[in-house]
Every structure is written in structure tokens, then in C-alpha cells.
């Protein structure tokens, strides 16, 4: 619906294609729509970013793709196609066989994502045994190699160590090793560096880039840090309150953000080339001020470009002219930056 | 979901049992250092160790045969011979050597305590793990059963089982074991449920690891600490309950078996003249139960994941 595929260059088919995804949680306080009308696709080798503040629905979107939302309390609608197959039509069995083998995920917090009482060697080995039908011995050897590949020296001697014996950066390396163990074609990284020190963040991102580039791995990078996007991603989808508000390739997004929210995100990151003493401009308010999309634009209360229409009518995601062929470009705004009506 | 159980990988590196032993080692190694620093823990450990040694070595330590009524003639309705060169602690009300009876009583308490706790642990753990691991109807059914068991005071439950099954050592063990079932079932179910919400379980799910493997290989090892602690505390309860059942006349009816609870009962009538007869077994019961409780509480603190680095 919003895809702007250029007719001139034939692009490879999308590996992951999400259309009109909506996730509703049934809670004791009524239903909560965490995600709606989310569409994006990822081709093999492409790096796509989902960007947004806390609570914008990034994790819920990725969990829906992985099939990890609680079946009882979460209702997932729309379509999620992987390699042409409709994931939502698959059985639990079929989806579980894909997880870890075809698609893998790296979680935000390396402190809690590893089992504290199981040696890391066992945690790496079990995914190999599960999907590659390896014996224990084969899995152990392979685990040592995997640790070496993610930059843990003498990996095979550290297989017996427990997570608490490793630093945060090391743990994230282990989690990356586990995620990439079976060479998945799709990797979802949910804020993989948020919980780490700044210096370690750069190392981990560099490692991820090395490991996925050239292998044809499709990467979905979830982050609230546009700095991460700048170094790694081709296509960006900016989310706010559960919906995509702007989709654009990286360069035009950074050069000419159109949605006021995107503009705000860009202004709030520190820049080395900014004049000294120039204050950062945080987006006023917090995501808690978000309205539901039913009564107009959810970003309106925090928006500098707000016009009357924003609070009475809900903006639709409208396809834009694509600057670069093969990329998605779309905008959900009545009064975008650079074309202000008032 | 759990239909394809047989295809679970069982390689030497990743069998659930294998993981659990390694896990246990590291857990205990860390706990040991913390245990040594607490005087109460050391006291508890010493008592437990002594008790176990005495129980195991009773035949070597005891000066006489157990429950021999060789000196029954020396016992009169008014008095029981006290300490002498031949009998360090004197005789008991049946005319047996007191020290011998106490030593063999330790053996009896240990056997019944361990067997009944193991019984309660295995049945309770199986129930708790299936309730927490399978959820849904199984969970509801198991938990109703546990609620019913819990609503009956454990001693009353043990009394009812012993009354139904008749007086024998086995029925004592079963009676006390049954009373432990709901405690372990609750512990493991709660642990299963709280662990299932943890990130590492979600992460294992993201790797397509099967449900059964997640429960046995990831969740269960994390419940090991609290289970060990509970088992230790349950031993204390069991030792008291063995004595209590005997005291109520529901214990092992074989008079050849030395048992602290029955020694207490026999001493009851003579308490005015000869408090010694009740004090010895009473102190044994109290110290042993205290030892296991101290040790269990210390273990609880030592194994607390929040205290682990
Ligand atoms: N299991 C759940 N039940 C009910 N609501 C949920 C559940 N999980 C998430 N939500 C809601 O969905 C919304 C989006 O959450 P999500 O975790 O996707 O945010 P996020 O963009 O990943 O934020 P963060 O940057 O903090 O990770 C939140 O408002 C949250 O309250
Ligand atoms: Mg998140």
C-alpha cells in the first residue's frame, strides 16, 4: 500500500513483508492497541531500522514477527510474510522451527537474556543441537568457534563459564553468537546496545555490521538512537505511539526529515559539528502525553507544527515520491516540515 | 506442544540432567563461601553433620544391642536405674540402654525423615512442574488438589494417613511425605511461573527451543536453590512429625525399633520422678530440628540469587 517500488531496477523479493500489522493486548483494564497499521519490508542483505521512543511499539512489532507474543492476551492481525509464506497462518510448530534457524533475535538486556545458572557453552550448544541436529561434541566444538567469531578470545576454553563471569559487552557477544549460530536469514536486533557502556556500544555495532554484511542477512535494527541508524541502516521507519509516522531511506531522512517527530529526534542527538554551547533541543513533553490515534494525530500535543486539523482528523500514512528506487517512502502528517501551511 | 518429546536432543553436553549437575556445583561452590561466614550456619551445619554421622554409625557407637530388654527387671514402677558405669545415660523405661536407644533413634529419624522428604519432594515437584510447565487445566486441577491438602494442618493430614494405612514404618513415611507434597508443589509451580516471565525464557523461545527443554533445562535449574533449602527445612519438620506421630500412638508399632517419639511417650508417666527419661529424647529432637532449620535458613540466604555476583 505504501511501497514505492521503482519500475526501473528489479529488486529482489522481500524476505520479510509486514502489512497492516496490528497488535491488541487484552488486559484487565480493557484492550490496549500497542501497534497498528504497521507496514514494512526487508529484502535479503538489507538493513532496516525501526526507530521511536520508549513505548512506541518497536518491541511488540518484533515479537509479533518472531511469534513470541502471548497467544492468550495478544491479538495479532494483518499479514506477516516470510519468504512468501504467511507466518500468521502457520502452526506453533512451524513457527518454532523457523525461530533460531531462519530468524533470530537479539534482545536489549544481555544481563537477563542469558540463563544465569547455565554455562554459556550449553546455551550456545542447545540451539545448534536443536536446529542443526548436531551431537553434543559437535555442538561444543562449533560453540567454541562461534565465540571466537564474535571476538571472544580462546572461546572454547570459556564454554564452561557462567554469565555472571562475563562483562556486559561479552554477554552481548555471546547472545550475538547464539543468534547467528544457525546462520539465520533474518536477524532482529532489539536495542542491542542500549544496556551497554558507550565505548562497548560502538564495538558491538561494529561486530554486528561485520557479521551481517556480505552474508545476505536481512537485519531489522530496533533503536531509539538515530546514531545507530546512521552507521548501519539503509531504510528507516519512524514509529510513534504504535504507528509508523515516517518511512524513508537513511540519507533523505537525515538530510530532510519531514515529520516533525523525526525532526525532533534529529535535533535531540548531540552533534560534533554543532557550534559550542548550542543547546540540544529535546522534544517537549514525553510519550506519556500521547493521545490515541482515534482523536487526531497522537503526536499533536507535543508538535510545534500543529494545526487545527491535527486534533480533529487522523492523518493517514501517505506514500511519497521515492528519492531512491527500491526504498519505501511515506509520511503521516498534515503539516510536514518544509511545507508548513501556517 | 509437547508431543514430540522423544526428539529432544540428549547429547552429552546438553541433556537437562547434565546441565543441572554442573549448575548445582557452581551454585553450591559460591554458597559455601557465604555459609562459612555465618556462625549460625556453621552451628547448623555441625549439628546436621553430627546427626548424620551418629545415625550412620549408630551400630558402631552403641554399646549394646538396640531395644534389648535385658535389664527390664531393674525397672520398677517407681524408678528406672540412672547413669552408672555400665550405662552412661542410664536405662530407659523399657529397661534398654538409654544411649543405645538415642543413637538408634537418630538412625530411625534420619531414615524416616529422608525417605518421607524425598517422597514429598518427588511427588510435589512432579505436580508443581507439570502445573507450572503445562498451565491451563492441569494447573487448575493440581492447584485445587494442593489447596485442599494445604487447608488441612500437616500433622492432621499425617495422622489421617497413618490412621488409614495402619501402624508401620512405611505408613509413617507416607503420612509425613504426603504432608510435604503441597509445599514442594507450590514452591516449584511458583518458581516455574515467575521464571517463565524472565528474559532468558523469552530468549530461549526466540531460538525455537522446545517447551520441555526450556522447562527442564532452563527453568528447573533456577529452582534448584530454593528446592534444596525447602528440602532441608522439611527434614526438620519431618523429624518432629515422626516423633509427634509416635507420641500420638500412630508411629511404627514395632517395639524393636528405637524411636525418640516413643521414648517420650513412655517417659510421660514417669516425668515427675524421672524427668531424665523425657529430657534426653526431647533434647535430641529439638537440637536436630534446630540444626536442620538453622542450616536451611542459612542455605536460603547463601543461595539467594540476589546475593550472587
Ligand atoms: N504484554 C503486554 N501487555 C499489555 N501491553 C503491552 C504488553 N507488551 C507491551 N505492551 C504495551 O505496548 C506498548 C509498546 O510497547 P513496546 O515494548 O513495543 O515499546 P518499545 O517501543 O519497544 O519501547 P522501549 O524502547 O521501551 O523498548 C507499550 O505501551 C506497552 O505498555
Ligand atoms: Mg522495547
Image: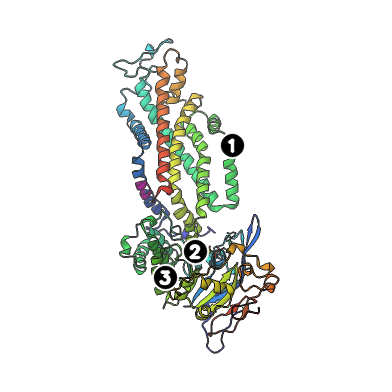
Q: Are marks 1 and 2 in contact (CB under 8 Å)?
A: no
Q: Is mark 3 within 8 Å of ligand 1?
A: no
Predominant secondary structure, magenta span? helix
Circle 3 — which element? helix
Which residue matches tag 2? B206
Q: CA distance from mark 1 to mark 2?
A: 40 Å
Against A128, is B115 above or below? above
Mark 2 residue crowding within 10 angstroms, few (<14) / some (14–19) / many (20+) = many
Residue B36, percent across and down? 33, 40
A33 sits to left or right of A266: right
Q: Nearer the viewer, mark 3 or mark 2?
A: 3
- Please name whichever residue, A291 or B67, is drawn nearer the observer in this view of the structure: A291
Q: From the viewer's perspective, is A78 left or right of A62?
A: right
The picture places residue A2, in percent across and down from the top left corner, at: 61, 79
- Residue holding disc 1: B151
**Chain letter of the residue carrying label 3:** A
Residue at the spot 43% in from the left edge and 38% down from the top edge: B297
* Residue at the spot of label 3: A205
The disc numbered 2 marks a residue on which chain? Answer: B
The quadrant of the rendered image in which ligand 1 is seen is bottom right
Q: Is residue A322 visible?
A: yes
The question of residue B27 being in magenta is answered with yes
* The magenta stretch spans residue A263: no
Magenta highlight range? B25-30
Q: Chain for mark 1?
A: B
Contact (Cβ within 8 Å) of mark 1 with mark 3? no
Is residue B256 something one can see in this rendering?
no
> In the image, residue B159 lies at what x, y percent?
54, 30
Query: Do the residues at discs 3 and 2 belong to one chain?
Result: no
What is the spatial separation of the Cα atoms under label 1 and label 3, in whole angstroms? 56 Å
Label 1 CB sits under 8 Å from any ligand 1 atom:
no
Describe the element under mark 2 as helix, strand or loop.
loop
Amino acid at each position: 500500500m505504501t511501497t514505492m517500488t521503482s519500475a526501473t531496477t528489479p529488486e529482489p523479493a522481500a524476505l520479510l513483508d509486514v502489512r497492516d500489522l496490528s497488535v491488541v493486548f487484552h488486559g484487565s483494564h480493557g484492550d490496549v492497541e500497542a501497534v497498528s497499521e504497521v507496514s514494512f519490508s526487508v529484502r535479503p542483505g538489507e538493513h532496516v531500522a525501526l526507530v521511536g521512543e520508549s513505548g512506541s511499539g518497536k518491541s511488540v512489532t518484533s515479537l509479533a514477527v518472531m511469534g513470541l507474543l502471548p497467544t492468550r492476551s495478544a491479538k495479532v492481525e494483518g499479514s506477516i510474510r516470510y519468504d512468501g509464506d504467511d507466518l500468521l497462518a502457520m502452526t506453533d510448530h512451524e513457527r518454532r522451527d523457523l525461530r533460531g534457524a531462519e530468524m533470530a533475535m537479539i534482545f536489549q538486556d544481555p544481563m537477563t537474556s542469558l540463563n544465569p545458572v547455565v554455562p554459556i557453552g550449553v546455551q550456545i550448544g542447545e540451539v545448534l543441537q536443536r536446529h542443526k541436529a548436531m551431537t553434543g561434541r559437535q555442538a561444543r566444538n562449533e560453540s567454541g568457534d562461534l565465540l571466537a567469531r564474535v571476538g571472544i578470545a580462546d572461546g572454547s576454553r570459556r564454554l564452561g563459564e557462567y554469565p555472571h563471569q562475563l562483562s556486559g559487552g561479552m554477554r552481548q557477544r555471546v547472545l550475538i553468537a547464539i543468534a547467528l549460530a544457525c546462520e539465520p536469514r533474518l536477524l532482529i536486533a532489539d536495542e542491542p546496545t542500549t544496556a551497554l557502556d558507550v565505548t562497548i556500544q560502538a564495538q558491538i555495532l561494529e561486530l554486528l555490521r561485520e557479521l551481517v554484511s556480505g552474508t545476505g542477512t536481512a537485519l531489522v535494527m530496533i533503536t531509539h538512537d538515530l546514531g545507530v541508524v546512521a552507521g548501519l541502516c539503509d531504510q528507516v521507519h519512524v514509529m510513534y505511539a504504535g504507528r509508523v509516522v515516517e518511512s524513508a531511506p537513511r540519507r533523505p531522512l537525515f538530510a530532510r526529515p519531514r515529520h516533525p517527530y523525526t525532526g525532533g529526534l534529529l535535533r535531540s542527538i548531540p552533534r560534533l559539528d554543532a557550534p559550542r554551547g548550542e543547546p540540544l533541543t529535546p522534544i517537549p513533553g514525553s510519550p506519556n502525553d500521547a493521545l490515541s490515534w482515534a482523536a487526531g494525530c497522537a503526536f499533536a500535543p507535543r508538535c510545534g507544527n500543529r494545526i487545527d486539523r491535527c486534533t480533529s482528523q487522523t492523518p493517514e500514512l501517505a506514500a511519497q515520491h521515492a528519492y531512491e528506487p527500491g526504498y519505501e517512502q511515506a509520511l503521516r502528517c498534515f503539516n510536514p516540515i518544509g511545507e508548513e501551511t501556517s | 506442544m509437547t508431543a514430540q518429546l522423544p526428539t529432544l536432543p540428549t547429547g552429552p553436553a546438553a541433556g537437562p540432567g547434565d546441565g543441572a549437575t554442573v549448575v548445582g556445583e557452581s551454585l553450591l561452590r559460591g554458597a559455601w563461601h557465604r555459609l562459612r561466614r555465618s556462625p549460625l550456619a556453621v552451628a547448623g551445619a555441625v549439628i546436621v553433620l553430627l546427626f548424620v554421622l551418629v545415625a550412620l554409625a549408630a551400630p558402631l557407637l552403641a554399646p549394646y544391642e538396640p531395644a534389648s530388654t535385658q535389664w527390664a527387671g531393674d525397672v520398677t514402677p517407681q524408678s528406672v536405674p540412672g547413669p552408672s558405669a555400665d550405662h552412661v545415660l542410664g536405662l530407659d523405661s523399657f529397661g534398654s540402654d538409654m544411649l543405645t536407644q538415642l543413637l538408634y533413634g537418630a538412625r530411625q529419624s534420619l531414615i524416616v525423615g529422608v525417605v518421607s522428604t524425598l517422597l514429598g519432594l518427588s511427588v510435589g515437584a512432579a505436580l508443581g512442574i507439570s502445573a507450572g510447565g503445562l498451565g491451563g487445566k492441569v494447573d487448575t486441577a493440581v492447584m485445587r488438589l494442593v489447596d485442599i491438602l494445604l487447608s488441612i494442618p500437616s500433622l492432621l493430614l499425617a495422622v489421617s494417613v497413618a490412621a488409614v494405612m495402619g501402624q508401620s514404618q512405611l505408613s509413617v513415611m507416607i503420612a509425613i511425605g504426603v504432608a510435604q507434597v503441597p509445599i514442594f508443589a507450590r514452591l516449584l509451580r511458583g518458581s516455574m511461573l515467575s521464571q517463565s516471565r524472565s528474559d532468558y525464557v523469552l530468549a530461549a523461545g526466540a531460538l525455537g527451543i522446545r517447551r520441555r527443554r526450556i522447562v527442564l533445562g532452563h527453568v528447573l535449574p533456577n529452582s534448584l536453590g530454593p528446592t534444596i533449602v525447602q528440602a532441608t527445612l522439611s527434614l526438620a519438620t519431618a523429624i518432629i512429625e515422626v516423633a509427634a506421630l509416635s507420641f500420638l500412638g500412630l508411629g511404627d508399632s514395632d517395639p524393636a525399633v528405637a524411636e525418640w517419639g516413643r521414648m517420650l511417650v513412655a517417659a510421660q508417666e514417669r516425668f515427675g520422678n524421672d524427668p531424665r527419661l523425657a529430657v534426653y529424647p526431647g533434647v535430641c529432637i529439638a537440637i536436630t530440628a534446630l540444626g536442620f532449620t538453622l542450616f536451611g535458613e542459612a542455605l536460603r540466604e547463601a543461595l539467594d540469587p540476589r546475593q550472587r555476583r
